[in-house]
Each structure stands twice: as C-alpha cells, then as structure tokens.
Image (spheres, grey):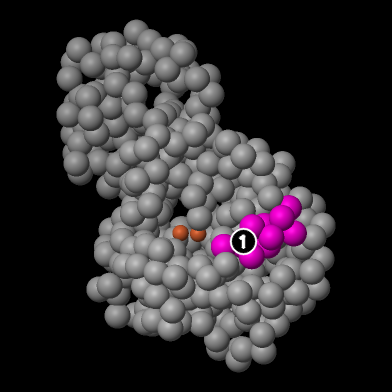
Amino acid sequence: MEIVLISDGSLPMDSPVRKLPFFFSARLIDMSKVSPRAIGDAQIAVVELLKASDAGLAALKSSWGSIAEIPVICLVDKNNRREAIQAAALGKSEIMQRDTPFALLLRRIRSLTSTDAGSRLPEGTAKTTVKAYRSSNAFLESLCFSAAESSKIQVNLMSESASEVLTALSLDGLSSWMDAVQSHHSATYSHSLAVAGLAGTFAKSLGWSESDCREVIAGGLIHDVGKMRIPLSILDKAERLTDEERALIDRHPMFGREILKPRLEISIDIKKMAIQHHELLDGSGYPDGLKGNRISQKVRLITICDIFAALTETRAYKDAHSPRGAIATMRDMGPKLDQKMLLQFAQMVLENGLGEIKRATAFAKAGTAA
Ligand SMILES: [Fe+2]
Ligand SMILES: [Fe+2]
C-alpha cells in the first residue's frame, strides 16, 4: 500500500504528515509536480496545506484530476479560514483538522484503504491467534508512536500481547502463527511478529519459565524498534537497496539504543535483545562487537530466531531459503552463533512442522533487513 504526501515544497516541521512515512510506504510530491505518473499506484493522497503558496495551490488545482480517483485527505487548521477555503476550493477531498489526534488520522487512512492489519488474515485462522495477532500488532503501532514522539512505551500492552502470543502458540501452534503473520501488509511488522512467535516457541521448547517465554516474545516484538526511525519506503522497498539505505538500516540497533535507553519502564533484558541482536559470538557483529559470554542467552536466542526469520523471508533480490536451507546456512556461520542452541532450534523447527511453511509468495516484493 502506497500513500502520496502532497505539500508545497518540503513538509513543514510541525506537520503530522511527517510521521506517516513510519507507518506507511510513502512518497512526497511537490504540489506543482502532481501528475498521473507521479501518483502512480498510490492508494491515497494526503495534502498538507500548511504554508502552501498561491502558486502551489493553483498548480495543484489544475492537476487535481490526477488524484480525483483516489481518496484524498486535506489537512487544515480550523482557525485558519484561508486554509479551509483553499481545501474546499480543491474539490472532492476529506478535510481533517491538523490537530486531530494522530491515531485518528491513521485510523482514517486505514479505513479508506482497507489496510487494517487483521483484514488480510487467512480464512479459518484460529480465534486465539487472531486475538494475539491483533494485540501484538496494536503494540507495534503504539511502539512506533513512542519512537516517533519519544513518549513512554505501553508496557501493559506489551505484556498483554506477549501473554496472548504465548497462549496462541500453545493452543494453535507456531505454524498457525507464522501463517497469520505473513499476511501483514508490511514486511517489517510481519518480521517482528514472526521473531516473537519463533522466540516464544523456542524458549518453551528449551523448558524456560513462562515469564522468560513472555519476555523473549516481548523482545521479539521490540527487537527492531530502531527501524521505526527509518521510513517504511526504505524498509519495505521492493528494489535493491542503495549503499546509503543499507547503511541507514544497519544503524537500527543504535537507533534502538537511543529510543530505549531512557525508557525505565523496559527491562534491561529486553533492551539488550533490541540493542544486541546483531552481535555475534566471535565479536564480528554490531554495534559494539561484543564477544562470547558478554552476550546473554536471551540475546543469543533472539539472534537465532531473527536470522532464521530473515532468511526464510523473500527479499527483493533473492528467494526465501527453505527452513532447512536457512538452518544449514546458520550452521555454516560456525563460531558466530551458539551452535548448541542452533541444534536445539533446528529440532524445534522440525517438531513444529515448519519444514512445510511457504513464506515465498507473501513477500515476493519485500526488501527488509533482519
Ligand atoms: Fe530483525
Ligand atoms: Fe535487526
């Protein structure tokens, strides 16, 4: 699902539209450059009228036909008569106040484009899985809010989702969870949900306590929180990433550290899972090049689940590994991974029938990094 953001020049600093690229794959178009080609396959347009010049508005009005076919939301300031008149003059569009709570703007965009995360779940998905999927997705969205606004993380929602995921995994099984999560419209969200499911099932198979299982599920949900500082148009990009884009994505554990460090409501163990999941036992990982026993069991577990999830997802420029192929690749990583734990993981994958899962078609176009 793609969204176009239309503004006169760059988006003003105080526009809520600046946050949309973290929730949707979004492109910014200058008011004077709107054309059917520029709109492309976008499903919705959001027009920011703040600081729009008369010339910009005149250009937009003359090319209005190019966006008339898709829903358009115009953001205006209720105290600014000029903006309200301009929005009305543009013709068919939905007018929203700029200070509408951001969550309502998101909800409206979703309802106009039917990108509700639950709307694409496979038919017949078990109820417990649907419930856990919805609440963990809601948690990921709230996490994106917290990252965008440097506000508190909703720990209650996090614990609730982690418990529900654990129940769903116990009742419906891991493959039902993996089937459900791959229906998500964002490969990046789907990945975090997958890592959470793998982590919970793996921890349970290792005989870890219920509270540790819940903690690694929460860790799985949160592990790529740093990516919430990176626009989805890069994270979910269909084409091969440029070097700059790849370098930006590789900074996500650092961004995760920035986001989580001041968050006292998040446990140290969960913070470590987010900051250290790209560390490798031989010291060749990032961001800190940690080695051996400086990397905890929970982090090792998340790393294994993360790499496995990433390898079995299709990227823009490579097919998905089969689960067996992914495990073989991970065995080849030798001293970088906890090989004893990897053997146990391989066992868990087989026991859960994941050898049969097909993840290739759902993300035929996804291009994310682990
Ligand atoms: Fe990841
Ligand atoms: Fe990551």
Is 50 located above or below residue 340 in the figure? Answer: above
Residue 158 on image: x %, y %: 48, 74
Q: Which class describes the residues within 10 Å of circle 1: few (<14), some (14-19), or many (20+)?
A: few
Residue 229 on image: x %, y %: 34, 52
Q: Which residue matches tag 1? A: 332
- The residue that appears at 64% across and 65% down in the rendered structure is 331
- Residue range (magenta): 322-333
Q: Is 269 on the left or on the right of 321, as rendered? A: left
- The residue that appears at 27% across and 35% down in the rendered structure is 76
Pick the residue in front: 359 or 32. 359
Residue 137 on image: x %, y %: 55, 60
Q: Is 228 on the left or on the right of 184, as rendered? A: left
Residue 68 on image: x %, y %: 48, 18
Q: Amino acid under label 1?
A: Asp
Is residue 96 visible in the rendered image? The answer is no
Magenta region's main secondary structure? Answer: helix
Residue that sits furthest to the top in the current view: 62
